[in-house]
Image: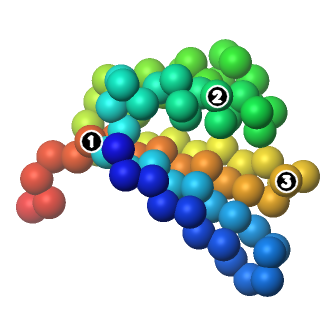
Amino acid sequence: MTTQYIRIGNNKWDILVHYDVSESDLTDIADTLYELGCPKSDIKKSLNIVTKRFNTGMTFTNADYRISVVCISKVTSGK
């Protein structure tokens, strides 16, 4: 997994992007989502999507903290 942290504006919004997510990354991502207030049932469903299928993704946003988390699954060929 590759992780990228993006800050938009002058501390106005943060984006945490996880690329090439695999099952070995689930604990770290789940912990982050839980800390940001994502319901456990949504965490389980979302991470199941990005680890069981190629070319998928999920997002979670917490407007109070002004942060979005983006997870992108493994992808097939770019063609």
Label 1, residues with CA under 10 Å away: few <14, some 14-19, many ≥20: some
Name the amino acid, label 1: Lys
Specify which label sits upstream in the sequence, 1 or 2: 2
**Most foreground residue, 4 or 38:** 4
Q: In the structure shown, which secondary structural element does the residue marked by tag 2 occupy?
A: helix
| Contact? badges 2 and 3 (CB < 8 Å) | no
Foreground mark, 1 or 2, reads: 2
Q: Which residue is mark 2?
A: 31
Q: Residue at x 48, y 61 (%)?
A: 4
Horizontal side, residue 3 vs residue 39: left or right: left
Quarter of the picture containing the N terminus is top left
Identify the amino acid type marked 2: Asp
Question: Which residue in the protein does label 3 denote?
Answer: 65
Three-letter code for the amino acid on which mark 3 is drawn: Tyr
- Is residue 49 visible from the viewing direction of this image? no
Q: Position of residue 28 (x, y in %)?
A: 54, 31
Q: Position of residue 27 (x, y in %)?
A: 52, 23
